[in-house]
Image (cartoon, rainbow, N blue to C red):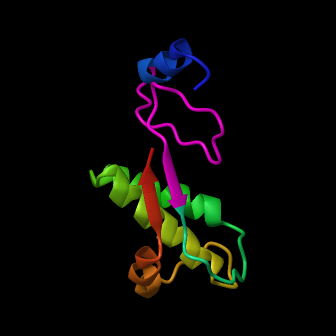
Amino acid sequence: MENHRELASFRYYGIAHIIRSRRNDRSDRCTTWTINPPVVKAVNTVGCGDTLVGALAVGFYNHLTYEECLINATAAAVSNAMEKQAGKVDIEKIDQYKQGIILKKE
C-alpha cells in the first residue's frame, strides 16, 4: 500500500486481505510473500489469474493458513495453465504441482 491511511481505509470497509502481484516496493505494514511456481511448459494461460483468485477465496473461506491458501491457489493456476481449455483445472494433479512450489515469507 502506498501509505498507512490507504491501508486503513481498506480495513474500514472490511477488506482484510490485499494481494498485489510482482510488488517492487516494500512496506513495513504489510507481509510480503514470494511464490515461485514449478517450471512447466504452459499450454494456455488464459484464466490463470482468475483461477488463482478463486482458489484464494476458497482457502480464505475455509480458514486455511496464508501458506496453504497461497500454495493451493498457485497449484490451481498452474493446473489451469496446463490445460487447453481456459478455466479448466485438473484436481487430480493439484498435489503434484503443490510439491514444486517454493513459498518464502519476506
Question: At which x and y percent is residue 71?
Answer: 42, 63
Q: Which residue: 27% across, 51% down?
A: 63
Whether residue 88 appears in this view of the structure is: no
Quarter of the image for residue 50 reads bottom right
Residue 44 in picture, x, y percent from top left:
72, 78
Residue at the top extreme of this rendering? 5
Q: Which quadrant: the N terminus? A: top right
Q: What residue sits 55% from the left and 78% below the top? A: 79
Determine whether 70 is above or below 82 in the image. above
Q: Nearer the viewer, residue 54 or 31?
A: 31
Q: Front-most of 72 and 23?
A: 23
Span highlighted in magenta in the image:
13-35
Residue appearing at x 46%, y 31% in the figure: 30
User: In the image, residue 20 lies at what x, y percent?
Assistant: 59, 42
Magenta highlight: main SS: loop
State yes or no: residue 104 in magenta: no
Above or below: residue 58 compared with residue 85: above
How many callouts does the rendering have? 0
| Position above or below: 17 against 5 | below
In the visual, does 43 lie left or right of 73? right
| The C terminus sits in image quarter | top left
**Residue 24 belongs to the span the image colors magenta:** yes
Residue 7 visible somewhere in the drawing: yes
Q: Is residue 89 left or right of residue 16?
A: right
Say which residue appears at 53% left-offset and 42% top-offset: 19
Compared to 25, does 56 lie above or below?
below
Between 68 and 10, the residue placed more toward the observer is 68
